[in-house]
Image (tube, grey):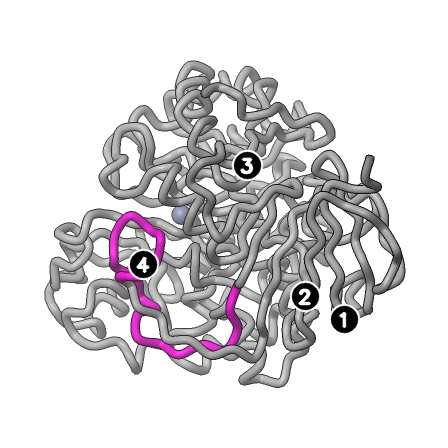
Amino acid sequence: MTDFDLVIRADRVLIDGRWRAQALGVKDGVIARIGPRHAEWSALEIVSVPSDQVLIPGVVDTHVHVNEPGRTEWEGFATATRAAAAGGVTTIIDMPLNSIPPTTTVEALALKRKVAAPQASVDVGFWGGAIPASLGTLRPLHDEGVFGFKAFLSPSGVDEFPHLTASQLREALAETAEFGGMVIVHAEDPDRLESHGGGRYYEDFLASRPDTSETSAIAMVISALRATGGRAHILHLSSAKALNAIRGARAEGLQLTVETCPHYLVLDAGHIDDGATQFKCCPPVRDASNREALWEALLDGTIDFIASDHSPATPDLKLDGDFGRAWGGISGLQVMLAAVANGARERDIPLATALSWLTARPAAFAGLVDKGTIREGARADLVVFAPDRAWTVDPARLEHRHAVTAFGGRTLAGRTLRTWVGGRQAHPHIDEEPPPGRLLRRSAAAPERATAR
Ligand SMILES: [Zn+2]
């Protein structure tokens, strides 16, 4: 008998926001014990992390579009979760679109779970969808364990997921408030979006989705919160002009949270070439001063956390060259941790601070009480990360289904070397073994195992 299944020793383990020399004893998927670096424990496997590398909790990415079933040619569970593991992401929560059917019914959720279970290299949870046809029937999906309900205020880009009007948003917030749920909102106001955004020029595309489309939609969300007492979350905030309204809503005591994405923190409009539609996303990447204001808002707590909004499509749809026609979505799942760590380094923000926006904060947001943190009793979702190791993003070498990303060609400091999910190795990928991911329900206390294989 050994003490543990796995023991990991490292000079720098991130615990409570500090770096400490420790040994972790992992048993049955859980961090069973934390002790001194040289604790004399036995285990089936003992890993000693070199001193230039750190041991961190796995990243929790609450915003990923896997697209399977129905648009698996865009991205599927096997490729998405392998990309996640390779990038240090150990938990994803899948968006209700652009799979077909979208996750707006209990049957569609059951189908997603069945498809995801045997392929999941990392843990997978699911968002439900609030579309006009599903209003009034959200409760059954909530009871089936979705983490909340996604709604659009502007056209989503796919016909099977129509957007809500302002009054329908109020209905959705009132309905979810009855059972303690939340609505996560794609906040662009369709009345402020202009139709002339097509063509090769990024400037025209950007002008067609101005800051006011976000500020106006977020004002709508805030007034709906005030009217209903519900809980809402702003997805993929791009415009820093909305930050004051968000601060005000919080000061009022409204239940409002907000995320931004690595592409808004790393890229800027001034460096996007005309025709370079791999950079197209909605809302769009804005200018460099806007980008810096988003970093400030993370630091002052106005923005709660970072999520990838990984939303691939096939290369022919994505690399169209025309900003009107090309698919709006950026593939950032595998690159997110390195991109954020690198961006933090460039701004002299401590790595531990940046990691909180990728781990503990999103885990708390989603109610994943045993994730995003290294402590006794937490899931052994762990990552060996080399903060000083520089690498250049080669899209062809990413695990995403398609070799397209807005981060291609960038040199980033910070590389994921090894990932465990529930104490089992997820990266580097082991072919012979069933993948280690499980399916998650909103109440994370007793997630069910992904055993359908
Ligand atoms: Zn999205």
**Upstream in the sequence, badge 1 or badge 3?**
1
**Which label is found at residue 11?**
1
Separation (CA) of disc 2 from disc 1: 7 Å
Q: Secondary structure at mark 1?
A: strand
Circle 3 is placed at which residue position? 436
Q: Secondary structure at mark 3?
A: loop
Amino acid identity at mark 1 = Asp
**Upstream in the sequence, badge 2 or badge 3?**
2
Q: Secondary structure at mark 4?
A: loop
Separation (CA) of disc 3 from disc 4: 31 Å
Q: Secondary structure at mark 2?
A: loop
Amino acid identity at mark 4 = Cys
Image side of residue 366 versus residue 408, left or right: right
Amino acid identity at mark 2 = Val
Q: What crowding class fits label 2: few (fewer than 14 Cα within 10 Å), some (14-19), or many (20 or more)? A: some
Amino acid identity at mark 3 = Pro
Residue 204 covered by magenta stretch: no
Circle 4 is placed at which residue position? 281
Quadrant housing the N terminus: top right
Separation (CA) of disc 2 from disc 3: 22 Å
Q: Residue at x 56, y 41 (%)?
A: 224
Percent across and percent down for residue 288 are 41, 81
**Upstream in the sequence, badge 2 or badge 4?**
2
**Which label is found at residue 265?**
none
